[in-house]
Image (cartoon, rainbow, N blue to C red):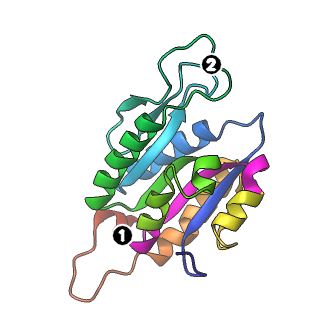
Amino acid sequence: MFDAQCDLAALVYERQQDPDAVLRGFAADVNARGCRVVGMVQAGRCADSSLSAVLLHNGEKLLLAQDFDPAAQGCRLDLARLQNAGERIAGALAHGADLLIINRFGKRERDGKGLSHLIERALDADIPVVIAVGKDHFADWVRFAGGMSVKLGCERDALDAWWSGISAGHAQPAAGSHPTVCELLK
């Protein structure tokens, strides 16, 4: 699944950092430049009923939390809702994308579940991927990615530099084809 040519980046964050704000601003700017960003960015907190995500290709907000249960503790992620979000992202990917953003790498992705199938699908289609990875999950990420990813600090400058480098490499349209707006801007 992963090789030395893949465009895969882990935005590694500490507990006190907000990867969602970094990814949200980055996605908005890349979209504003005429590129098509697909994926989702988390909104709300995992440990309460506000857990949700925003789909980057259309701005729709999806609830990801389980229905409120006062006895529940820990992460309240509803797996069926996550799967539904994944299906919606897969449908958007099928219509083409310049970049896939996945909000988190967690234990489900580590085990080959969650949204991990979207990473494989994007890389197979030569679509770059960036994913937020908590520092405490980074060793699992390295195993999952086979060591074939770029490690970025949770800073907008690092993300912009990565995108600038990889988007330039994707700006070579096939002979006889017409370049897309994104290809021209890269």
Does residue 66 sit above or below 109 in this rendering? above
The range drawn in magenta is: 123-138
| Residue at 33%, 58% in the rendered image | 93
- The quarter in which the C terminus is drawn is bottom left
- Whether 83 is among the magenta residues is no
Q: Is residue 84 left or right of residue 14?
A: left
Amino acid, disc 2? Ala
- Pick the residue in front: 40 or 76: 76
Q: Residue at x 67, y 21 (%)?
A: 73
Look at mark 2 in the image and give the residue it sits on: 72
Q: Residues within 10 Å of mark 2 (few under 14, many from 20)?
A: few
| Disc 2 secondary structure class | loop
Q: Name the residue type under label 1.
A: Glu
Q: Is residue 106 visible?
A: no
**What residue is disc 1 on?**
183
| Discs 1/2, front | 2
State the image coordinates of residue 152 (x, y, percent, origin top left): 70, 58
Query: Which mark is first along the chain, 2 or 1?
Result: 2
| Along the line of sight, the residue nearer the viewer: 2 or 83 | 83
Q: How many circles with numbers are drawn on the protein?
A: 2
Q: Nearer the viewer, residue 94 or 152?
A: 94
Q: Position of residue 172 (x, y in %)?
A: 38, 81
Q: Identify the element where label 1 is drawn.
A: helix
Separation of marks 1 and 2 at Cα, in angstroms: 47 Å
Residue sitting at x 49%, y 31%: 78
Residue 159, position as x, y percentages in the image:
62, 55
